[in-house]
């Protein structure tokens, strides 16, 4: 444990504190050693339509902040902080970011600055491209360096996080054809705290459904971007998201035509993630499960080769709200601000 | 509604009445119009280690049969019935079937007689091949004819049911390459009523996990057999089963390299299932969900083409215990005995 | 099975067909033997804001009616039917009922006509009392007679159904003090298909919460009314509803100071429900569970005496949408129209 | 944050590390600031039938300890530690405790030493009474003092924890009659990692059931003991446990005949828990939910008076594995060893 008592206090704000991403950022900050040591302060908490409410009404699990009242998500409220986390609806980040000083570390949990290809952005989001920011996935090749000292960070989408980490080593090493298939089963919090009949408990419990199939989901180009960058060539991505009856977690089944045998494939993954604190290749034969990473920042992976079908099969599990969103945001903050990358993040899940 | 009052009474037994398959067969039989008209009698109910128990202790949802006492699963107890359903552990069906008259309709919900390839059987089940029986999936080409009047029927596995119905039209029409990928998310009842730590409620709720990946699951050769027969050539199958926190239901995401466009693909499916009472191609853009087929014998499908990835994407949903097991068993009985195929089976699910 | 071929066709409409109550009425009607025999027709299906939609979009489990288009819930659309089921928001039934002929059987799944005490109505619902109709709980003393041939029927609330049936025999026989305590755990469909953050799947899964405590829930006076009528004296009711992470089912724990021993208490219940087709006193020591009555019209009860605490303890389970709403509605229809009371209703649950 | 670098290292063992209680103790220890500062060491991890297994196979959520191999639960393995947590089947603690030095802090998560009344023990557990140890519920009057420096501690049962904290202030202040009714809904992990058909996921999901009713549950005398001690007179307890489809959490509905009005009742609770770090009386009208305390050591309470029924109604929520077991164990360790009571424990839940 580092003695941080001489370090400057870092002041943090969260815009969108009433949503799931904002709530999870706050959960992690409350457990951050710097917060407990008084070296990290939780400043403004803001919201859209929920401004004026007590946080305790909206995030009753954050008891230490229950009496905080949400301010409106304006640049005025967010000014004067060293770090600002944004958990806003798509399209709202650019205006807010432009109104804040360049020196402020802005960490956007939304999609606005994830895609580098303006055409892909417009095709999938229907609006003008706002630009792209350093991408908050340190475990991708070169990812960590781009985040150290960064002042603007785009947190990856939840599906791209696990799909990219599951496939990047294989694609980078060229042990698969650049044609990948991802079927990822997610808990419902990935859809956000959105009033939608299809997200009611009565509808989701006891039922599984696919959505956004055949390339329609907005995370498709983001996966392709990440893998393409790693491969140095275009990677074709088939992506099918599936909604399962649980609040959190993503389990991704990723396949691609394989050029090596199982041992060679495993060696590639062992090497790729040997030093990563949050990406764990499980022992042979042990399969990831989302329940084991609940609330943790860990990514668990298993790699196999289906010799009959000629495919690499990689299974990956994350908590979509932690490593898939808020954990990546805090990990990125740590890198941007100069903290130890893993501070306040855990590989211990809450189970059963 | 047919007047059945002049028809002979059909006497039915269920071996393995304390398991999930046996329980579901009984649930369907209790709702069968012939049972309610007194033309179908529920005779012997047998079990293994549960013999001697009241059915009400083990299947409390079957109130009308609560006071029945389970007999041992012996040929003596099962003799004297017109139809015998078997819901036994793998490997126990052959001996019992051999001890019953050839005229008895035996409908095996287990795996013993599903595979025609003895080598595949031995590779996946580790024992000697017992043979193969007519396969209880009437919706496959030629499937219905094989079942009319049959005296021995092998009920398909739950995953092969939905995967085969989802892919057979495409494979038969040659609109895809014979290389298919199936990722299927199942409720826990598919594992049977088995004492296994990994199936405890505390372990499965809030968690999703894959198992039997990379060709290890026993349903892989069964899917390959069904699709190969339809294609007239070998079909390579990659199959990944995933366990989700719900008791029932399977949602399968099936992909294959496609040779046609979306309209052509849709036309193939419309034609294939136009007259099928239980297989429903949903309107364009509407996606299957397992909750909608809970307790029903329906299969719901959606077909799309991912042009960027060059894949046909077919999503299928069934209830693994109904259409995936006991519904197929009753449907097969109806065909074998000469009832209307759909009697006692419904396309109405229990939702929400 | 009765031969109904000479009987007149009964024409049924459902107002509020896009809600959970309306959907469950339709599910039961589709399985009603009269429907399958062509003697019961499903006529107008109407809705409020969902008018104009295909039923298949809103109730995808009702495949045989998927292509029906919802009409607006007006008297014009509902005219010309023998039976009209109402599944409307509170306060909308009276106007619609007044605009339909007196000869039409109107079965209201809402609360408007349940309470006989105008003051209680106004205290709990805040509006003027619309009156009271025969109460659709045939198993209460005198309940059945009031429903035979009735033309207006108020379907009981879901909690009052199970609480009243669990306590009525004891209260009627005077074996308890008229001071009862009901803690009832319900699935989420009891709240209706309502867009409410607290009903989102992400919020309800993995969590249990009480609501409407200390007499605040509107079902409190309805339970008191039912038990008071049976007792012939005022019965004080403490009622706590609890929301559990499942779509359907209510489990009620009902206690009252007891004046007899366990055998005497059991005898009272055995006698009270000996001839009831849907109310089942389970064998001694066997406890009700909601999963066993899923989709069924059964009420399962267990009775015990806690000698140390001096309390009668009655546990009751129902499916809130079936016996708690739509099953009671169909049971009431059967009585009103002169069908056999149990037609189209089952005591077989869908489990596991 | 206290600088602990000069303090002696505390060495901790966990017996029963493959169970839910042991796993949760380890989860909390891994997050304990003393562990992260290197001042608390996790020593022997032992198990019964699972001895010899890697912890990663059994507790895959504890990634940092995945490679630890479980030793057998013998005194030899547990010797040489400052603190030993026991998560053993009932009846096994005494022998092990007797074989360890008196100076070792032994914290028993099992029931063996909870009851002070030998007759009550024998009535409920059927064996000879092993004695009683200081009771690990610091928030009860006098509870904290008994734990400071203690060398043997009995961790309370999960239901008694929430029921006692919910009712103790009222009983202590004499604002209710000493006749209380507790209906508590629990997640399935409270039953332990036990192979039992009734605990299979297929059985528990979608279903709620009561068990151990009418005074049969072993936690009944423990609740009576706690409240009786606080009241200074016998308190009659009616207790009904209910199993709900979620892994964790208990929501207790507690009632008793009340002698004061709502404001007076609230004042009693405000005063009782004003300085408690883990017991939170929620703002008026806000109701506890188990999801908000998932993984946290918090107890959330709400108090109301049902004037019509003449009852105090207290709703309480805890996580049965954290505050209900392992959190209380760690809290007790902190007091016994002289750490700050709240170290390593949080009031922040993991939600949604």
Image: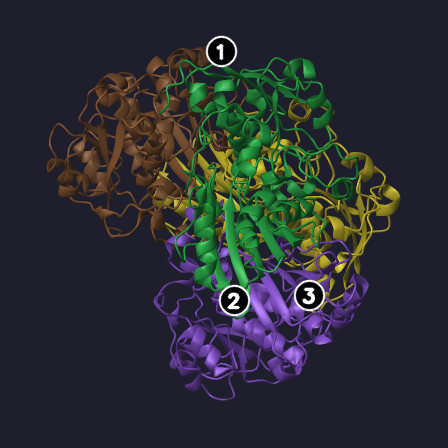
Chain colours: A purple, B green, C brown, D yellow
Q: Taking D134 as reference, is A333 left or right?
A: left
> Foreground mark, 2 or 3?
3
* Residue C263 tag number: 1
Relative placement, left or right, of D14 versus D183 is right
Q: Are marks 3 and 1 in contact (CB under 8 Å)?
A: no
Q: Residues within 10 Å of mark 2 (few under 14, many from 20)?
A: many
> At 41% from the left edge and 58% from the top edge, which residue is drawn?
B285
Q: Nearer the viewer, residue A215 or C120?
A: A215
Which part of the image, by quadrant, shows the N terminus of chain D?
A: bottom right
The residue singled out by tag 3 in the image is A257
Q: Is residue A67 visible?
A: yes
Q: Is residue A259 above or below residue C262?
A: below
Q: Label 2: chain?
A: A
On screen, residue B12 above or below B171: above
The residue lying at 62 percent from left, 83 percent from top is: A146
- Identify the secondary structure beneath mark 2: helix
Dot 3 and dot 1 within a common chain: no
Q: Position of residue D183 (x, y in %)?
A: 48, 34
Q: Which mark is residue A26?
A: 2
Q: Disc number at residue A25?
A: none
**Helix, strand or loop under label 3:** strand
In this picture, is C103 found above or below B313? above
Left or right of residue C94: residue D330: right
Q: Chain of mark 3?
A: A
Q: Residues within 10 Å of mark 1 (few under 14, many from 20)?
A: few
Say few, some or many: other residues with alpha carbon within 10 Å of mark 3 (under 14 / 14 to 19 / 20 or more). some
Closer-to-camera residue (C164/B37) = B37
SS class of the residue under badge 1? helix
Write down the chain letter for disc 1.
C
The span from disc 3 to disc 1 (Cα, nearest Å) is: 70 Å
């Amino acid at each position: 444990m580092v003695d941080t008592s001489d370090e400057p206090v870092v002041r943090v704000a969260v815009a969108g504190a009433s949503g799931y991403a904002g709530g999870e950022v706050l959960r992690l900050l409350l457990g951050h050693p710097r917060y407990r040591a008084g070296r990290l302060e939780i400043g403004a908490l803001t919201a859209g339509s929920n401004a004026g409410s007590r946080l305790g009404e909206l995030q009753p699990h954050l008891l230490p902040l229950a009496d905080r009242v949400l301010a409106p998500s304006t640049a005025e409220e967010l000014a004067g902080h060293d770090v600002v986390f944004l958990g806003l609806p798509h399209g709202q980040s650019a205006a807010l970011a432009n109104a804040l000083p360049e020196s402020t570390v802005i960490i956007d949990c939304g999609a606005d600055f994830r895609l580098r290809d303006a055409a892909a952005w417009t095709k999938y989001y229907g609006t003008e491209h706002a630009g792209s920011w350093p991408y908050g996935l340190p475990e991708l090749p070169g990812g960590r360096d781009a985040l150290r000292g960064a002042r603007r960070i785009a947190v990856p989408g939840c599906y791209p996080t696990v799909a990219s980490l599951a496939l990047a080593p294989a694609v980078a090493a060229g042990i698969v054809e650049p044609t990948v298939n991802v079927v990822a089963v997610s808990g419902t919090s990935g859809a956000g705290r959105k009033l939608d009949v299809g997200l009611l408990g009565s509808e989701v419990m006891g039922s599984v459904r696919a959505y956004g199939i055949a390339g329609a989901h907005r995370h498709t180009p983001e996966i392709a971007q990440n893998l393409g960058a790693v491969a140095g060539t275009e990677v074709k991505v088939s992506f099918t998201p599936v909604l399962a009856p649980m609040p959190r977690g993503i389990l991704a089944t990723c396949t691609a035509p394989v050029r090596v045998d199982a041992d060679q494939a495993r060696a590639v993954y062992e090497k790729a993630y040997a030093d990563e604190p949050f990406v764990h290749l499980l022992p042979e034969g042990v399969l990831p499960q989302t329940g084991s990473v609940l609330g943790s920042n860990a990514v668990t992976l298993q790699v196999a080769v289906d010799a009959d079908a000629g495919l690499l099969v990689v299974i990956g599990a994350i908590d979509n709200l932690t490593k898939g969103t808020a954990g990546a945001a805090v990990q990125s903050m740590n890198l941007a601000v100069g903290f130890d990358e893993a501070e306040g993040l855990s590989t211990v899940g809450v189970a059963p």
